[in-house]
Image (spheres, rainbow, N blue to C red):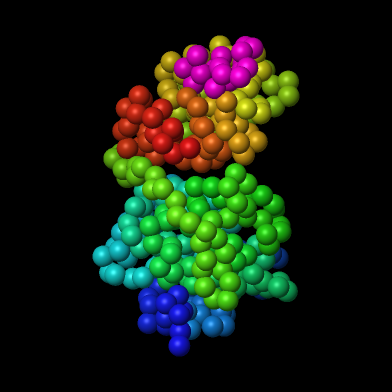
Amino acid sequence: MLSADRDPNRTVLVLTLGGTIAMTRTAAASGVTPTLTGSDLVGAVPGLRDAAEVTVEDFRQMPGASLAFSDIVSLVDRLKQADREGVDGVVVTQGTDTLEETAFLTGLYYQGPTPVVFTGAMRNAATAGADGPANLLAAVQTAVSAEARGTGVLVVLGDEIHAARHVRKMHTTSPAAFESPNTGPLGHVAEGTARLRGSLSPIAPVPLPVGALPQVEIVTASLGSSGTLLPGLANEVSGLVVAAFGAGHVPETWCRPLEALASTMPVILASRIGTGPVLTSTYAFPGSESDLLARGLISAGNLDPYKARLLLAALLAAGTPRPDIAKAFLDHS
């Protein structure tokens, strides 16, 4: 008898966006390009029909590096439609270059009950040991799991289940590239069944954009950087994320330009390390975290610079008042 997580009568919608998982070689190109359709992907997965009845839609077909904010807004609209259609789960396949960002942004917007699982591949279909089929199977098995409902958007690769809010790509080529360095994985897929250690508290949803998408950029602190480029951003962006040293520090020369920018737009203080929080009151030198926060910067908390940028852009696109932006970063970190 099949377990509840192996019921082939359950339905999963697979939305393909392209990426390495859909790439192979063609005679017209020297390298791999996204040419495989969703049907090609599903057809290459042994045992998939034992996990669920799968429907495939080719939503986009592009490298992960070319996906845009607007593509994810459209994806969220499709996820809401899938809720109304009553599917048991949704799997999104895409390139791993931006997977941690698109999954996080989707989680900011999508609050439906249907499990949504992102997956991809580190090895394309033309290589020995391609990991796409195994990742797709594990993602489908997770999407139909009763335990996955209410956990928010998930990411599944290498039989590990990660929360979109915590996962990061930590290696350029390794099949084990994805980790959740602050928390560890949320669970694993074993013997065809998703096994989660526990549930996550829901995060506050962000409304979909009400107008044109704002321009938000990241500036990264580095040894000896003078901050010469900072003043030029005043009329070019709607918000800024500082990827600071360590626990939230920048060169002293950055202080006045950042203070000036923070008087006109939200400036988020994150750490370029990507793991661990931005501090608030440990250091007191010019350019320290306490100094920058006193100058009007907003702490990113535990969010890395890339996720902080997405949250800020989403909040600005929704017309969020500035005092509520600081509160949102507290809620999401």
Rendering coords of residue 145 (x, y %): 44, 69
Residue positioned 39% across, 48% down in the render: 202
Residue positioned 65% across, 36% down in the render: 273
Name the foreground residue: 44 vs 177: 177
Residue positioned 37% across, 36% down in the render: 315
Rendering coords of residue 155 (x, y %): 52, 58
Residue positioned 58% across, 55% down in the render: 185
Rendering coords of residue 119 (x, y %): 53, 63
Q: Quadrant of residue 128?
A: bottom right
Whether residue 48 is situated above or below residue 158 in the rendered picture: below
Q: In the image, is 297 to the left or to the right of 27?
A: left
In the rendered structure, which segment of residues is drawn in magenta? 280-297
Whether residue 228 is situated above or below residue 191 in the rendered picture: above
Name the foreground residue: 226 vs 86: 86
Main secondary structure of the magenta stretch: loop
Q: Quadrant of residue 95?
A: bottom right
